[in-house]
Amino acid sequence: MRILIAGVALLALSTAGFSQEAKTQIKKKTIEYTNPSSGSEMYGAYCAVCHGVDGKGTGPAASALKKTPSNLTLLTKKNNGKFPILAIQAMIQGDNSPSAHGSRDMPMWGDIFRSVSSSPAVVELRVRNLREYIQSLQEK
């Protein structure tokens, strides 16, 4: 199942070789269905392009964003040793204000997840599993 959502999935395209001032650009991409039970699969499909496969904020699209993506591996460390469950859940769902994230470069995944499934339970499952996967990335 594929759903077209403008500005959702980001793809970094390098224009290197065309000029010395070539810059990474963001291209809108069709969002693909992922297994709601797999936080890892959702992270790879939706988050890694900006936050990087390792979660450190160095994905291929990171340099084209207004604000550098967060290093997701340091969330617990920056929160006095406790993973900020509610804050991360709000960030994924898009419940936060743009100023809390720095910009609205990050898609509001809650809205996107609702467009993929009309079931509130499936949307909640997606948010929970993605949040738990991000929690698994924390530096020890």
Image: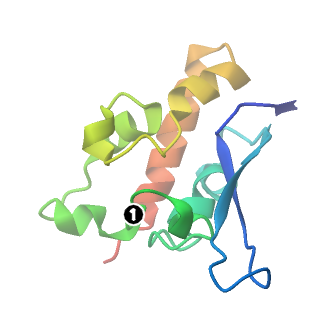
**Nearest the eye: 10 or 31:** 10
Q: Which residue is mark 1?
A: 72
User: Can you give x and y, in whole percent of width and height, for residue 72 in the image?
Assistant: 39, 63
Q: Would you identify the image quadrant in which residue 97 lies? A: top left
**Nearest the eye: 67 or 45:** 67
**Nearest the eye: 39 or 112:** 112
| Residue occupying the point 64% across, 69% down | 24
Residue 127 drawn above or below residue 25: above
| Residue occupying the point 45% across, 47% down | 131
Q: Residues within 10 Å of mark 1 (few under 14, many from 20)?
A: many
* Residue 93 as seen in the image, left or right of residue 122: left
The total number of labels drawn is: 1
User: Can you give x and y, in whole percent of width and height, for residue 110 in the image?
Assistant: 52, 28
- Quadrant location of the N terminus? top right
User: Can you give x and y, in whole percent of width and height, for residue 22 in the image?
Assistant: 67, 76
* Residue 130 as seen in the image, left or right of residue 38: left
Q: Would you identify the image quadrant in which residue 125 lies? A: top right
User: Can you give x and y, in whole percent of width and height, for residue 77 in the image?
Assistant: 21, 69
| Residue occupying the point 79% across, 80% down | 18
- Quadrant location of the C terminus? bottom left
Q: Would you identify the image quadrant in which residue 50 lies? A: bottom right
Amino acid bearing label 1: Leu
| Residue occupying the point 75% across, 74% down | 15
The answer to whether one can see residue 122 in this image is no
**Nearest the eye: 40 or 90:** 90
Residue 43 drawn above or below residue 29: below
* Residue 23 as seen in the image, left or right of residue 54: right
